[in-house]
Structures are given as structure tokens and as C-alpha cells.
Image (tube, helix red, strand yellow):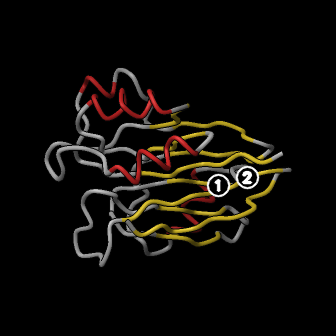
């Protein structure tokens, strides 16, 4: 059996967009779990995603008390034998991989946001680090993005950056 994840971060609604793109909502409907790595800004985004499916999320540095009271700073869940953690910030990209190994031992997949820059690397300990970018605020990136990930039998089966 496999489980489909949709990874989202840094939606910054309503500051950067008035709403989530329709393509993201369709992907949320197709996903088994929606993972959001913070900076929702409006709690209505959490409410909307929860109406589309199971949400695993954290608060980010731009999120207020309304979101911080509903979400943790770090979320953890095991899905299909894959140990997943979600955080908003991981610090500078320099030496990110060994820092995350030390900060999150025993994790197979770490989803993070904050930079709005898509990221896909593997740490020395074998942890996969994924940042989906942003579906609404691409900053200096060429495209708005999210990621889809399939997990099953204790492994990451597939991970894909999706341009919107």
C-alpha cells in the first residue's frame, strides 16, 4: 500500500495571494495527506485545506496566535513506515544536511519551508530534506511550486516538484 502526500509551504494568504490556486485544491483532493510547512498567515487556509483532507502542518514565523494555538512548531507522524517531521525553518543552506541530522535523529523525511526555494537533498544519515517552495509567492524563483510524494513499505517511493 502507498500513501500520497501533497507538500505545501509559505502560502502567505492574503498578503501574497487572495486564495489557494485551484490546481493546489485539486491536488489536495487527490492526496491522502496534505503537509503544510508553515507561513499560512490566515487560519482560513488551514480550515480550507482541512475541508479537502487530512492535514499535517506547523506554524511559521509569519503565523499569529490563531494558528500557533492550533498547530505545533514541529510535527511528527509515521506514514507507511516512513518517519516524517515537518518544520518551518531549518536555517541557512550551508551545512543544512548535517544540522538536520543532529536536530531530527531517526527521521526519514523532513519537510520544511521558509525560503520559498524548492529543495531536495539527502543528509549523510539518509534523511530526505524537501522544501516544496510556494504555490503563491515564488519570490525570485521562476515558478510557483508544490511537491507530491508517495510513501510505502517504509520508503519514499517518489518525490516530484510540481510547477503551477
What is the quadrant of residue 108 in the picture? bottom right
Residue 78 screen position, x and y as percent: 72, 38
In the rendered image, which quarter contains the N terminus? top right
Q: Name the residue under label 1.
A: 109
Badge 1 marks a residue whose secondary structure is: strand
Q: Mark 2 points at which residue?
A: 151
- Count of numbered marks: 2
Residue 144, image x, y percentages: 33, 66
Please tell me whether residue 86 is drawn above or below residue 97 in the rendered image: above
Label 1: few (<14), some (14–19) or many (≥20) C-alpha neighbours in 10 Å: many
Percent position of residue 48, x then y: 36, 31
Q: How crowded is mark 2: few (under 14 residues within 10 Å), some or many (20 or more)?
A: some
Query: Residue sitting at 31 percent across and 51 percent down?
Result: 21
Nearer the observer, disc 1 or disc 2?
Answer: 2
Query: Can you name the residue that lies furthest to the left here?
Result: 15
Is label 1 in contact with label 2 (beta carbons under 8 Å)? yes
Residue, x 73% and y 66% (percent of image)? 126
Q: Which quadrant, please, contains the C terminus?
A: bottom left
- In the picture shown, does residue 20 fall above or below 58? below
Residue 100: assigned label: none
Amino acid at each position: 500500500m502507498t500513501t500520497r502526500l501533497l507538500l505545501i509551504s509559505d502560502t502567505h494568504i492574503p498578503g501574497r495571494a487572495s486564495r489557494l490556486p485551484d490546481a493546489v485544491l485539486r491536488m489536495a483532493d487527490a492526496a491522502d495527506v496534505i503537509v503544510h510547512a508553515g507561513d499560512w498567515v490566515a487560519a482560513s487556509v488551514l480550515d480550507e485545506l482541512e475541508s479537502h483532507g487530512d492535514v499535517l502542518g506547523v506554524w511559521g514565523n509569519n503565523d499569529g496566535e490563531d494558528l500557533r494555538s492550533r498547530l505545533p512548531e514541529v510535527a511528527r507522524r509515521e506514514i507507511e513506515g516512513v518517519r516524517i517531521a515537518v518544520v518551518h525553518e531549518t536555517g541557512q543552506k550551508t551545512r543544512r544536511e548535517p544540522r538536520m541530522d543532529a536536530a531530527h535523529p531517526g527521521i526519514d523525511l523532513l519537510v520544511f519551508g521558509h525560503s520559498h526555494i524548492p529543495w531536495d537533498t539527502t543528509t549523510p544519515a539518509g534523511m530526505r530534506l524537501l522544501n516544496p517552495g510556494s504555490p503563491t509567492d515564488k519570490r525570485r524563483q521562476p515558478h510557483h511550486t508544490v511537491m507530491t510524494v508517495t510513501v510505502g513499505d517504509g520508503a519514499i517511493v517518489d518525490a516530484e516538484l510540481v510547477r503551477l
